[in-house]
Amino acid sequence: MIGVAYTNDSTLEVTVDTDLDTLATALYVKVDDALKDDPRLTRWRPAVGIAPKLSDAELITLSVIQAFLGFTSETRFLRFAREHLSHLFPLPARSVGLQQTPAGGGIPAQRIDPGARHRHRPVGG
């Protein structure tokens, strides 16, 4: 049990808190505790280098939430997560990738000099 179900002792009814924040928090705590209890479950990371933006527990939690909610598109899930979960997880403002490059190629438009092709080198220089 993750810890979001409550039992009413007088009626033995079980109610579940469907709040996404509660589920995400409880799931994160459960995953984080499991990873700390068994270090073999975590990946080895070098002491130097680029630090990951998300911990293993945060990444696993987001992956499970993505599956629970039925997102098959990572892009759509990240858009959803930025809107609904960014106060819980350190998500980047937007993903960095090929979709940010201009359609005409890999050079941003402000760096293209349209007159560069037509310039000539000075004679004798």
Image: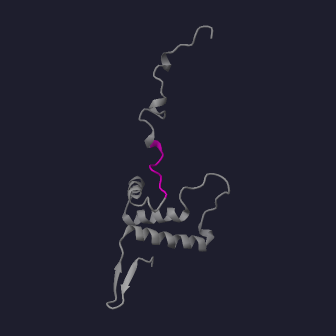
Give residue 79's quadrant in the image: bottom left
- Quadrant occupied by the C terminus: top right
Predominant secondary structure in magenta? loop
Which one is in front, 60 or 86? 86
- Residue 76 sits in quarter: bottom left
Q: Along the line of sight, which residue is nearer the eye, 98 or 94?
A: 94
Image: 125 above or below 69: above
Residue 109 % position (x, y): 44, 31
State yes or no: residue 92 in magenta.
Answer: yes
Q: Is residue 51 above or below residue 32?
A: above
Q: Residue at x 49, y 69 (%)?
A: 28
Q: Among all residues in the image, which is located at the extreme bottom?
A: 10
Image spot of residue 5 (x, y percent): 39, 79
Above or below: residue 28 compared with residue 73: below
Between residue 48 and residue 104, name the one nearer to us: 48
Residue 33: image x %, image y %?
55, 73
Query: Residue at position x 40%, y 57% from top?
Result: 77
- The percent position of residue 115, horizontal first and vertical second, equals 47, 19
Q: Compared to 27, does 82 lie above or below?
A: above
Residue range highlighted in magenta: 90-98
What residue is rendered at 46% in x and 49% in y? 95
